[in-house]
Amino acid sequence: MNKIIKNILGNNLIKEINGIIEKELSNRPQIDWDNKNVGGMQNGYRIDPNLGRLLIEHLPLSFSIINEISKNFTDILNGYKYVNTMYCKYSSEYGKPQLQNHLDKGKFETICIDYQLDSNTDWDLTIEDKTYTLKNNDAVSFHTKKQLHGRSIKSFNPGEYVTMLFIYFDKV
């Protein structure tokens, strides 16, 4: 089920994504992590000190970006529809980056495309018992509620970061 695609997007789409992130960070307020107001999550961004990350939920990607990514996973995404994209930047600037093996919660059967936008360090992703070392512009797919997934234990040095897009598709 897991599929990895290398160099998935062209430079123009990567620049578009970076522009969207920059715009969202400048236009959205920072919301306190403990504020569980679901509506606020769509309108702000959060810093999660427990996982060492900055998080933007509901990142408004264009159809061309979603289409370009999903067309590489058509065999896996058959019967699924695009729902949402989350942006995460993991860095010691936000706390201690960590992501223990877990299954996502929720009521829908979901496939996630983990897309590594940018990083200046390697941080292995584990899905079930397989390890993936994503490089910039690589993506891997997995079932969020069926497959254990997480990150290897790593101490981030000051200035090191990994930025990811989590692109979610729910079963129709």
Image (cartoon, grey):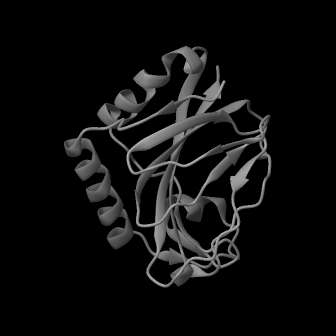
Q: Is residue 43 left or right of residue 18?
A: right
Q: Is residue 80 left or right of residue 18?
A: right
In this rendering, the answer to whether 141 lies above or below 19 is above
Front-most of residues 76 and 105: 76
Horizontal and vertical percent for residue 62?
A: 32, 39
Q: Residue at x 49, y 85 (%)?
A: 158
In this rendering, the answer to whether 143 lies above or below 105 is above
Horizontal and vertical percent for residue 165?
A: 48, 50
Q: Is residue 119 left or right of residue 35?
A: left
In this rendering, the answer to whether 75 lies above or below 20 is above
Horizontal and vertical percent for residue 78?
A: 57, 14
Q: Residue at x 33, y 72 (%)?
A: 26
Q: Residue at x 49, y 23 (%)?
A: 73
Front-most of residues 127 and 56: 127
Res 1 → quadrant: top right
Res 97 → quadrant: bottom right
